[in-house]
Image: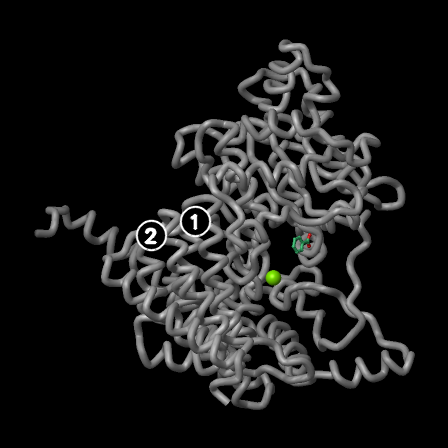
Amino acid sequence: MLPEISAEERDSYVFRLYEQLLEMEQRLIPIGLHVFGEVDQSDAAGMLQAIAAFDRPEIGVRSLPGLIAEGLGPREREELEALVREAIELFVADGLVPDHAAEFLARTANVAEQESRKVFALLGRVADGLSRNQEVDALIRALRGEYIEPGPGADIVQNPEILPTGRNTHAVNPYSIPSLGAIRKGEAVVAALLRRSLAERGRYPETIGMVLWGMDNIKTQGEGVAQALLLMGVEPRRDALNRVTDVNVIPLERLGRPRIDLVLTVSGIFRDLFGTSVEVLDKAARRVAALDEPDELNFIRKHVRHEQLAGASFEDSATRVFSNAPGNYGTNVNFMVSDGQWQRAEEIGDLFIKRKCFAFGRGLDGSRSRELMEQALSRVDLTYQNIDSAEVGITDVDHYFEYLGGMTQAVEVRSGRRPDVYLSDTLLAEPRIRSLSEMVRLETRTKTLNPKWYEGMLKHGFSGVAEIEHHVTNTFGWSATTGAVDEWIYDEIAGRYILDSAMLQRLRSINPYATRSLAARLIEANGRGFWAPDAEVMDQLHGVLGGLEDQIEHAGTGANQ
Ligand code: BEZ
Ligand code: MG
């Protein structure tokens, strides 16, 4: 029998369900793989809609949902988005001529034509850029030693100027980050992260373990760096050459909350590209640690003083930036997990620390500092990473679980409890904070279990099946490092790909090797205690695995030919 709930509880439940369905429906997902030299127009209107959702003050363009909301007054999000969608479809159907679309928005939503025409001008440039692909031509010109014009590297929604592709991608001036836009967005993300954590734990997290990557900070002009500085309650200071080389402390009255302590795990790529940001982050931690402020409003000072009382030096106890040894990259946690080279989960966190315990900043140049890192991780309440792209999510590549997962596992052993794990989503006009479990569910539903996603992959044949298998292994990576994967996810994956005989037949005829790995991974998930299906399901999985092994063995000896 269903539990008795009040009408309000029911309404609130239905509303949250509705919001979640809407979120999944509207989420941009990559369909299939990029084919070098080919144009992908599978969801051009969806892409334009995502791009139109942002204010872009740098080019004087407002967001379409914002303009419509202003014209109509408060409205349901769904209604605003339906109008945006209709206007964009009109614009596309008219061959990128804005007249009807602008008239439509003026008539139905009181949007001034001069404002909407600016948005359509941007969308027209994007649509034009999407329809051209000069990658093959540019490659051939490059091989001939000819000049290839440069273009920025970024996510298309964040910065549509990346189009057309096939240019010589450049990064950013490391002294310029974080940009003003990154700081503006960082403020909203940090506020949302702290609000969420406060709501769930009833107090601010004292220490956040944060991952910073190089590519991401290129793509977003330093959103991750901006967030780290803001968490500590400082803002970047620019010198006479407009270079960010120092910080200003935000006074507590303006900050309105405690300064949060951090442990920053930066990738090898970040360390190499953003040496100047490493110095600034390190300087910020030391500056904040030395402020004369009460412990309850300055967690960095609180922790540093605590360690000093126990005999540590100020310099050691204020070390907050860790990366690989110079010349080294990655945590290797991904290889340990996918190769099954571990018995106890602690081994994963140990490997993470072994690889990432090199301290940077104040001229340290990566000296091995294992004890300092372990001490810092033992205080972490919450681990966190920023997600900035619709193209690469937490189950698309093994790097999210190797970093955020690896750090989380290392914290769990050293602090004695599993930290809360959050990811932000700065792809949306209003940044969202999600727990890791919520993000795994969202990725699973919109990608791994979504027919639109896997049929898109299967069109690519052999590589497509391998991609499906990678998603399953990356999901498994979250179980191994954090335990954040619900069992129903494995039930559904098994049901969709292995226990459905028509699908199994398709997969094994296209790529029996990846199909074998997928079945073996599910069996491993059971063996490691991440999933406990009925014995009958396990029998079926073992039967399928045996059949695939025979198939592959016979193909190998030529018996099938
Ligand atoms: C980075 O951009 O820093 C990065 C890229 C891939 C894996 C890990 C880090
Ligand atoms: Mg890989």
Residue 131 location, x and y as percent? 65, 85
Q: Is residue 68 left or right of residue 264?
A: left
Q: Residues within 10 Å of mark 1 (few under 14, many from 20)?
A: many
Relative vertical location of residue 294 with respect to residue 419 in this rendering, above or below: above
Q: Residues within 10 Å of mark 2 (few under 14, many from 20)?
A: many
Q: In the image, what residue type sits under mark 1? A: Ser
Residue 208 in sight here: yes
Relative vertical location of residue 168 with respect to residue 222 in this rendering, above or below: below
Residue 263 location, x and y as percent? 62, 34
Residue 19 in sight here: no
Relative vertical location of residue 95 with respect to residue 379 in this rendering, above or below: below
Secondary structure of the residue carrying tag 1 is helix
Residue 106 location, x and y as percent? 50, 76
Q: Depth check: 512 or 262 in front?
A: 512
Q: Depth check: 136 or 184 in front?
A: 136
Residue 543, picture quadrant: bottom left
Q: CA distance from mark 2 to mark 1?
A: 9 Å
Tell me, for residue 479, which label it has, or none.
1
- Residue at 55% x, 43% y is 406
Tell me, for residue 531, which label it has, or none.
2
Quarter of the image where ligand 2 sits: bottom right
